[in-house]
Amino acid sequence: MKVDRAQRQRREIKYIVSEETARQVRSFLTSYLDPDENAVGKVDNSYEVQTLYLDSNQLTTYHAAANGERNRFKLRIRYYDEDPASPVYFEIKHRINEGIVKQRARVGRHAIRSLLVGASPSRGDLHAWNPQQWSDLLDFWQLVERLQAAPRLHNAYMREAYVSGGKGAVRVTLDRNVHAEPEFGGDLSAKFKKPASIFKGVVILELKFTERMPTWMIEMVRGFDLKSSGAAKYGEGVEKLGHSKVSRRLTGFQWGNSETTVATSAPWLDASTALRSSLGPNRK
């Protein structure tokens, strides 16, 4: 059984670096971290990541990030291949002040279409039963329902990943060849028609840790003279492609026929007035 190394609560710091610096960072990392289990045996310890972002017609989550709101979230579906037997990951990525809280549910591909058109989740939608993931799926669905969110943008990139042992308290990724295009369906294809290149010619270096930044990581940042920088793939994709192209709703998805519950397993949703106000009223 694979270990789930997803860091539910963590800090993230991003840097945009040259390919030369990225190679030097790779050499430095090998003294402290191991390749991510998904990258073992692959060229440059890299694998492809596919992401479908969901947002409202008004691009609510995009504008929250663009305006620098301290309490915000993204809705996305992440997958790594087109195998019908492989799970996909319904994710809510919350930014609360300086921290990240990530909810993640492994969902079977058979359930994608019904969920994206607003059907109430069922336990059978999960790839395998897990109480925490069931709660995360309900929270994802509630936010989608409130925003009337639908697929907007598909992006993909090659991720080089390293992680510490155990549950992965420290994780470092280097993302390359980021490309994106508008996407309004739920096929979760790995193919693109006319993608736009995002962050062309550079590498996105991301440091992720659950406690304090390790001393060796601080030394790496100083030694390579790294300067933190925003590198939001969804936001940059919207800017590159154009707001009007991403906000168009071509799916014909209908809303209002599914049951809504006010229950949530995420206490920070109730604690944060700013975040709740960004969601708008519950829909019945």
Image (cartoon, helix red, strand yellow):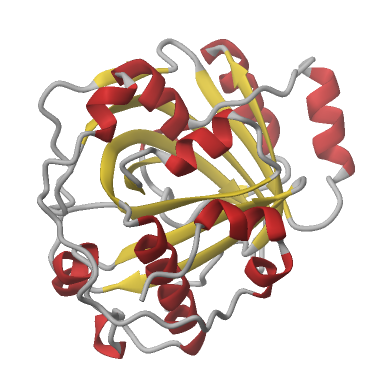
Measuring 52% from the left and 31% from the top, which residue is drawn there? 232
56 relative position to 2: left or right? left
Residue 134 can be seen in this image: yes
Count of marks placed on residues: 0
Measuring 25% from the left and 88% from the top, which residue is drawn there? 124
Q: Nearer the viewer, residue 126 or 17?
A: 126
Q: Position of residue 67 (x, y in %)?
A: 61, 30
259 relative position to 170: left or right? left
Quadrant of the image occupied by residue 233: top left
Quarter of the rendering occupied by the C terminus: bottom left
Q: Nearer the viewer, residue 173 or 166?
A: 173
Measuring 15% from the left and 61% from the top, which residue is drawn there? 254
11 relative position to 187: left or right? right
Q: Is residue 104 above or below residue 126?
A: above
Q: Is residue 53 above or below residue 191?
A: below
Q: Position of residue 47 (x, y in %)?
A: 36, 42
Quarter of the rendering occupied by the N terminus: bottom left
